[in-house]
Image (cartoon, rainbow, N blue to C red):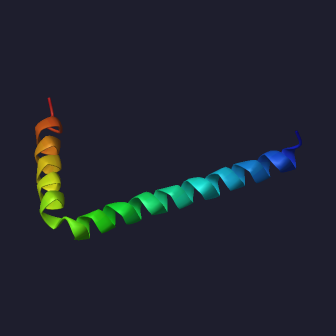
Amino acid sequence: MTQTSTREQDRERLRRRAQLLREIAEGRELRGRVTPRRTHLQRLRTMAYMRTFSRPI
């Protein structure tokens, strides 16, 4: 395999990964609009979890 084809494969893999991450973010945003109450509760749970485990020792 040549250096050029490896770079092209890496570029293609990164492009597909970026597309996947965009779709995941879009899905989360859509879910937040469709079920705002569930999203709000999840945000509160996440904040409580972060407060619990981010305290200095």
- In this view, the residue farthest toward the right is 2
Could you tell me residue 19's position as x and y percent? 55, 61
- In this view, the residue farthest toward the bottom is 33
Could you tell me residue 42's position as x and y percent? 16, 52
Q: Nearer the viewer, residue 55 or 8?
A: 8
- The residue lying at 85 percent from left, 50 percent from top is 4
Report the side of 7 relative to 51 (left or right). Answer: right
Q: Quadrant of residue 30?
A: bottom left
Could you tell me residue 40's position as x and y percent? 13, 60
**So how many labels did they put on this image?**
0
Question: Does 55 sit above or below residue 41?
Answer: above
Q: Nearer the viewer, residue 18 or 30?
A: 30
Q: Nearer the viewer, residue 6 or 22?
A: 22
Q: Quadrant of residue 2?
A: top right
- The residue lying at 14 percent from left, 50 percent from top is 47
* Quadrant occupied by the N terminus: top right
- The residue lying at 17 percent from left, 48 percent from top is 46
Report the side of 19 relative to 1 (left or right). Answer: left
* Quadrant occupied by the C terminus: top left
Q: Quadrant of residue 18?
A: bottom right
- In this view, the residue farthest toward the front is 34
Report the side of 26 relative to 15 (left or right). Answer: left
Could you tell me residue 26's position as x and y percent? 39, 66
Report the side of 24 relative to 47 (left or right). Answer: right
